[in-house]
Amino acid sequence: MPATSHPRVLGVAVPTPLRRLFDYRTGPSVPSGGWRPGLRVRVPFGRREVVGIVEECRDHSDLPLADLKPVNGWLDDTPLPDDWLWLCRFTARYYQHALGDTYHQSLPVLLRQGRPLEARTRERWRLTERGRNSHGEQLGRARRQAELLEQLRLHPRGLATGAITAQGFSRAQLDGLLDKGLIEAEQETVIESPRAEYRSLLAEPALPLNREQATALAALHEGLDRFHPCLLQGVTGSGKTEVYLQLIEAVIAQGRQALVLVPEIGLTPQTLARFRKRFRVPVVALHSGISDGERLDAWLAAASGRAPIVIGTRSAIFTPLAKPGVIIVDEEHDGSYKQQDGLRYHARDLAVVRAHKESIPVLLGSATPALESLAQAQAGRYRHLQLTRRASRHAPARLELIDLRGRTRQGGLITPAIEAIRQTLAAGRQVLVFINRRGFAPTLACHECGWLAECDHCDARLTLHRQPPQLACHHCERLRPLPDACPKCGSADLRPLGAGTERSEETLASLFPDVPVHRIDRDSTRRKDAFESMLAEVRRGEPCLLVGTQMLAKGHHLPHVTLVVVVNADAGLYASDFRALEHSAQLLIQVAGRAGRAEHPGRVLVQTMHCDDPHLRLLAEHGYDALARQLLEERRAAGLPPYRFLALARFESPRDAEVMALASAAAEALRDWLGARPDPVHCLGPVPAPMERRQNRYHMQVMLSSPQRSKLHEAAAWLVAWLEGNREARRVRWSMDIDPQTLS
Ligand code: ADP
Ligand code: ZN
Ligand code: ZN
């Protein structure tokens, strides 16, 4: 494509789920740099005008030129960043998603809406020559103006308007000083480049590394100028973050940028503070809590290179970088890196692809790496770096299995666990009780006839909640009032079955009335900041009980917790999903890792009905690595990822016959097509999804698998094309999930 051109036709990616470009005619006027791919345009689409992105510049179209609508205009004279365009195109192709929708999903909202590609600016105020020589003589009784003048005198580089108003000064006071010629304003971009005058990048010194950390960092330094995929496997609390920080220091010292991905619940103010305290350069954060304006600022600062460090959750992988230097994926095993609807991408996998394209290192860190990543390390494709020791004195605690069978439970806990809690609290320490069920009890049952409260819209039990009292479906969020009597037999003997966080909280509060009990789950932390303020209180160190779901399991440094009790370890042991065991082992190790992170050693009690389960015992006795090795062998034998690749076509509709008909027709068509080819692709199904009915919609699946990724992709692409061309398919919702993380 020539740098400037005057094509007659533009193939435009518009925001729609349709997997094709739409052709438009160019008009007499041309953007200053000519028409180029990557330019945003306004185009008529149906009855609306939408913002699309030019993908192809041509002189011909399959339609007569006279039938094409002209573009309404262009938004920028320069294309969107190349690296961003490349990644979106790759993502659309790999995940079999419409390019237009991929662009749309991965662009900041304001750019989708047509806002110009210009960074927002703000005013920075400083004293004029006259202001510097003045001591407020001419200010008379304007006391606040005099105080503002003194404030600015303390900041020779000036202060931004926001920083001034935050100190209680008003715009009128600024204008007062401006009118008197004592101060002046300069426009600056909201996120500024690091200033050259900084002598050092570091605001606080780096920690001296221990031997293992130093070895890991040295290996990372060696690969700064090439694609260098590394898996940093370090036990919880081993100082992985310190290695990230020192790696980033080396990267920004070269004038390049670092992109850091963290799990959804990992980007806490605490994590950010750790990065911001270390570096004297801007650290921009991208997560769901920022405004559209802030997101655009961060995106533009990253694209122009003004932001040396970008840290964000899953979608931050789509941040353009002018001078990429490294991509770090913290807790790389975390499920939140996979988007489960719409554009179904995996941010960790895209991180590796992107690093390869840019020829830069990529660092995946975890105490419990995904089997996919471990297999890559075993095969020698990723460099395997290990941290086996904690920075603090005590090694992570072993898991002690305790048998639930035949024991009476109170709020889910049996006597030995309650005793251990009592002793820990008496010693002045904190206890974390982990229970992966929010609500009071997993369900409500009739003691007379065995009736169970079930959702009318899903194949699922209703959870009993007490705060407020109601039955809730955790799959469709439907709420129902508590029944007074059994709807089946009329008995009033309705009892909660099992325990959730609310019930454990209630029991523990009555067993230990002198100690605060903090419940941490999605319900108790709905209010913004509730979680952080609870954690802040816990970090003060008074004895207390924490009862919580996996929100508590990950990443948090809780130095005073010395005992962790896992109420029930059995959820993943016999689940149908082939990843359930891997995921529950990761969760157990992460939860266990909260114990004993500071001066006192920790203890972890794991309640289970299956003390003899070989996987659970392997994990408890030999650790995550041993279990992971075993699971990999099993996956190899069963022909499952990472040794075979999967794609899952999902079908859903309120009418079960329609779903069944389409899923069967699709599977049959695919088998016919595959039958004519020698390629090793298997087609399984259609089968009902594990929860067939959800929100009154029926779900079916067809699974494709192959040991060869390229063959799998061809088959998946063929099926997608078949579905797009099928009239029946318009009445059923369907999707294609490449490398699905769950089969539900
Ligand atoms: P991870 O990310 O592996 O869970 P962190 O990086 O959070 O571990 O480190 C755990 C604790 O150990 C933190 O409080 C950190 O400040 C401390 N730490 C890490 N590395 C060192 C070191 N080399 N010397 C002293 N303390 C360290
Ligand atoms: Zn009954
Ligand atoms: Zn439901």
Image (cartoon, rainbow, N blue to C red):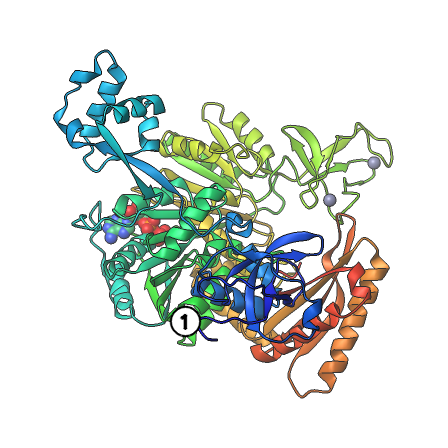
Which class describes the residues within 10 Å of circle 1: few (<14), some (14-19), or many (20+)? some
- Along the horizontal axis of the image, is 590 left or right of 126? right
Q: Nearer the viewer, residue 139 or 662?
A: 139
Query: Residue 385, can we see it?
Result: yes
Q: Nearer the viewer, residue 563 or 90?
A: 90
In the rendered image, the residue lying farthest to the front is 28
Confirm if mark 1 falls within 8 A of ligand 1.
no
Q: Position of residue 554 (x, y in %)?
A: 45, 48
Please tell me how many numbered marks the rendered image carries: 1
Please report the residue visible at 50 percent of the width from the left and 69 percent of the height from the top.
Answer: 630
Please report the residue visible at 49 percent of the width from the left and 60 percent of the height from the top.
Answer: 347
The answer to which image quadrant residue 463 occupies is top right
Which part of the image, by quadrant, shows the C terminus? bottom right
Q: Measured along the vertical axis of the image, is residue 591 above or below residue 499? A: below
Q: Position of residue 252 (x, y in %)?
A: 27, 57
Q: Nearer the viewer, residue 319 or 704?
A: 319
In the rendered image, the residue lying farthest to the top is 141
Q: Amino acid at mark 1?
A: His
Q: Nearer the viewer, residue 274 or 29?
A: 29
Q: What secondary structure is found at the residue carrying circle 1?
A: helix
The answer to which image quadrant residue 186 occupies is top left
Q: Which residue is identified by label 1?
A: 356
Please report the residue visible at 71 percent of the width from the left and 52 percent of the height from the top.
Answer: 47
Please report the residue visible at 29 percent of the width from the left and 42 percent of the height from the top.
Answer: 599
Q: Position of residue 102 (x, y in %)?
A: 57, 60
Q: Position of residue 507 (x, y in %)?
A: 57, 30
Query: Residue 699, can we see it?
Result: no
- Along the horizontal axis of the image, is 95 left or right of 563? right
Q: Measured along the vertical axis of the image, is residue 667 above or below residue 504? A: below
